[in-house]
């Protein structure tokens, strides 16, 4: 009868086993050390608080829907001032600025209550509507335009009434009570009160022409 002797591992295999055990132990100790470090930072960072963030890219002027947002927990020290805590408090509100995915939503990024135009007009500015005289599809919100006025009389002349005005929205032409629809869409422009007065004067006594400013102007 043959005797059975336990097989001895080669030196290389034993060395690899010892190295694997050492690496595993080192990883375990590192994880425990990181957990202890984070636990020690807890009082300094504050307790986790809910913060509403964008769930997808959102653009200025959008009316927020529940699917546009989500809630994340962040340490209270890193919660932005005025950050919203619940999605319900933002649904139906209008954005004043663009938001990237994961970017917190604060009260300052939401338009005040009001109509679809008034809620998007920043404080100190006004919304002024001018006819564009161009085909539909030429303008988009966010474009910059100059407004020129041509005045008649014995010596007609043209002058720039305002330049670099932002297009807040584009209104589709509609037939009015007094006649057919105007040629091309009308533009809702963001202007200062003084510019609104100049545009009103030019509208009453001259003919308006809108030109599009280039992206580098």
Image: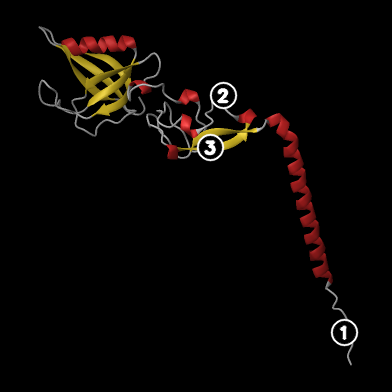
**Residue with the mark numbered 2:** 81
- From the viewer's perspective, is residue 115 above or below residue 1? above
Question: Distance of mark 3 from mark 1, alpha carbons?
Answer: 65 Å
Mark 3 is surrounded, within 10 Å at the Cα level, by few (under 14), some (14 to 19) or many (20 or more) other residues, namely: some
Residue at the image point whose x is 48% and y is 39% from the top: 55
**Residue 23 pos. (x, y %):** 77, 56
| Front label number (1 vs 2) | 2
- Point out which mark residue 188 bears: none
- Point out which mark residue 71 bears: 3
Q: Give the SS element for disc 2.
A: loop
Q: Earlier in the sequence, mark 1 or mark 2?
A: 1
Question: Distance of mark 1 from mark 2, alpha carbons?
Answer: 75 Å
- Where does the C terminus fall, quadrant-wise? top left
**Residue 184 pos. (x, y %):** 18, 28
Q: Give the SS element for disc 3.
A: strand
**Is residue 64 visible from the viewing direction of this image?**
yes
């Amino acid at each position: 009868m043959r005797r059975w002797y336990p097989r001895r591992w080669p030196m290389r295999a034993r060395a690899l086993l010892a190295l694997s055990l050492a690496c595993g132990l080192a990883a375990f100790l590192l994880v425990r050390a990181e957990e202890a470090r984070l636990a020690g930072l807890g009082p300094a960072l504050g307790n986790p608080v809910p913060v509403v963030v964008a769930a997808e890219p959102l653009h200025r002027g959008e009316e927020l829907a529940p699917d546009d947002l989500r809630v994340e927990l962040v340490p209270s020290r890193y919660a932005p001032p005025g950050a919203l805590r619940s999605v319900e408090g933002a649904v139906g509100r209008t954005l004043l600025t663009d938001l990237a995915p994961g970017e917190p939503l604060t009260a300052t990024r939401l338009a005040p209550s009001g109509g679809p135009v008034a809620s998007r007009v920043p404080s100190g500015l006004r919304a002024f509507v001018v006819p564009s005289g161009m085909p539909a599809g030429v303008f988009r919100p966010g474009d910059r335009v100059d407004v020129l006025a041509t005045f008649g009389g014995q010596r007609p002349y043209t002058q720039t009434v305002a330049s670099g005005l932002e297009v807040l929205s584009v209104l589709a032409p509609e037939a009015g009570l007094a006649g057919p629809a105007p040629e091309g869409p009308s533009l809702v422009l963001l202007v200062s009160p003084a510019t609104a007065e100049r545009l009103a004067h030019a509208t009453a006594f001259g003919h308006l022409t809108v030109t599009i400013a280039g992206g580098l102007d």
